[in-house]
Image: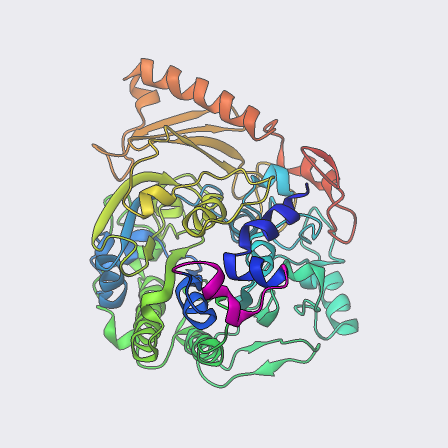
Amino acid sequence: MSRNSKEIRWSMNRRQFLQAAGVGAASIAALVPGCLSVEEDSAQTQRPNVLFIFDDQLRADACSIYGGKNIETPNIDLLARQGVRFTNATSTCPLCTPFRGMLQTGRYPTHSGLVLNWVEANPGQRCIGHIFRDAGYQTGFIGKWHLSAGRLKKAGKYKPNKEAIQAYAKENANTEFTPPGENRLGYDHWETFNFHTTFQNWWFYRDEPEKIVMPGYETDGETDLAIKFMEKNKDSNKPFFLMVAPHPPHPPFGIPHVPAGYLEKIPEQLHWSPNVNEKHPRRRKPLAARCYYAMAKNMDDNVGRIMKYLDASGLADNTIVVFTADHGEQHGSHDRVNKMVPYAESVNIPLIIRWPSRVPAGITSDELYSPMDHMATLCGMLGLSPAETCDGTDLSKVVLGKGKVNRDEVLMMNYVSHWDYFQTATLWPEWRGVRTKQFTYVKWLTGQEELYDNVSDPYQLNNLVLDQKDLPQLKKMRNALKELLGGAHDDFLAGAQYADWYDDQRNLMRTALGPV
C-alpha cells in the first residue's frame, strides 16, 4: 500500500467508514451504541488549525523572554508563558533559503539541494504543505517565500552579474512571482513574493503575475492578510494550515525601512554583548542596530494583534501557534554582521509553541530543536505521517509535556561563502559544526577548529581548542561531526563545487543522493 493510501485510511473516522459502506447518517447512532451524531462527531473530531509564524533574521535574544535588554517584547513573552519555549532551538544552516528548505521538506540541504539563496526548489519531493493539504487542511502561505530563483535565474552561478540581472528583470517584469502549481509545494492560498526589500508600500502576488501593492509597512500588511485569511476560514469545515513569513528585521537597516513611529521607541544607547568590540562600526554608529530593534518591536506588536484576533474570534483554543525565526543577526559580535556563521547570535532562534489545554503553559525545554524537526513534530502532534524522506526528529512528546527525547547533538553547516553564489573562501567561509546542549564545535574548510562551552561561556569568547582544554570533549565532537556528516551524505565540499548541482538557470539537477 502506498504512503498516500495509508494516510487516507488513517484519516477515515468511523462515521466516514459507515457512510462509505452505504450506511446513512440517520442510521449511524442506531448501528453503533454510543455513537455521536454526524454533527457531534464532526465537531469533536475536527483537527486543530495550525498558524506558523517565522520572522526573518530575528535572533533569540532580541526578545525579552530570551534575555534581550534593548526592547521589551510583551506579546512574544506572553505567548511563551502560554506554551512551551525552547532554549536550544537552532538555525542549523543560518541562511534564508536553506532554512526554508529544511522547514518545508524536513530534509538536510544536502538531500533537498537547497544549499544557498535564489535557487529553484525541487517540486518532486513531499513537503509539509502537501501533508497538511492531503489531510484535509486549507493551506496558505503569506510573506517571503525565497524558494525560487527569481531575478537571479539567468545571473550566473559564481559571481554577481548586475547587467544580467537587470536584463532578465527588464524582460520579465514579475521575476518574484511563483505561478500556481507544483512550485508552491502544497500551498493553495498564496499572498507571497519570492524576495524583495521594499518594506514600505510593499508588494506581493496572488495567482496572477501582477504586483499587488499594499500601503503601509510590510509586517503590518502581512498580519492584516493573515487575519483576513483566518476570518474567512474560521467557520469552514476544513481546518487551516497557514504560514506567515515577514521579512523585517532583515537588512537594509535605515530610517526609510523602519515602520513609522518605532525608531523613537528604541533607546539611543543600546546594550551590547561582550563579544562586540567597542570600535566596531555598528557599535560606534548604532543607527543600524536601532533600526533592527525597531523592526523587531513592530513584529512583537503584530504577534499581539494576531493573538488578540485568535482570542476574539474563538479560534484560540483550537489553533496551534508556532513562533520562530529563520536565523539571527551578528550586529558586530565576533566582528561580524549578518549571518552564515556558527556563533550564537546567528544560530540561536526563538521557538515557542502554544496549543491551549494540550501544550502545558509556561514550560521551558532545553531539547535541541532543528528546522527539520517541524514537519515530524507537527505531524506527531496531530497523528499524521511525515514524509518518508524526512530527516527531522519528532519532538511532539516534548511539546505536549509527555516526555523527553534527549537528543545528543545536531549538525550545523554553511555550504557556500556567498549567500547568493557558489563561492569558496570569500566573505563567509564554509564550515560544519556540531551543537549539543552545552557545546558548539566548528570545523572550517581550512581545517581550523573552534570549541565553546555555551553554558559557562555564552558569548563564546574562549575557544577551548586554542587553550587545549577539555581535549576528551574535542575528540567526542570530532567523532560526532563525522557521524552526522555521514547521515547527511555531506562530503564537506568547497562551495563552488555545489554549482554542479544546478543548471545555468538555477534549476536543481542533483543532490548528494543523486539526480533528481
Residue 130 appears left or right of 29: right
Residue 107 image offset from top left, x and y in percent: 56, 41
Q: Residue at x 74, y 63 (%)?
A: 163
**Residue 29 is a magenta residue:** yes
Q: Within the image, what quadrant is residue 313 found in?
A: bottom left
Please identify the residue farthest to the bottom as the structure is shown.
215
Q: Identify the image quadrant of the C terminus.
A: top right
Q: Which residue is drawn at 44% across and 64% down?
A: 46
**Residue 356 is a magenta residue:** no
Q: Is residue 318 above or below residue 423?
A: below
Q: Identify the image quadrant of the N terminus.
A: top right
Residue 252 image offset from top left, x and y in percent: 46, 65
- The residue stretch that appears in magenta: 21-34
Q: Is residue 57 above or below residue 219?
A: above
- In this orientation, which residue lies closer to the viewer: 79 or 505? 79
What coloring was used for the rendering? rainbow
- In this orientation, which residue lies closer to the viewer: 278 or 62? 62
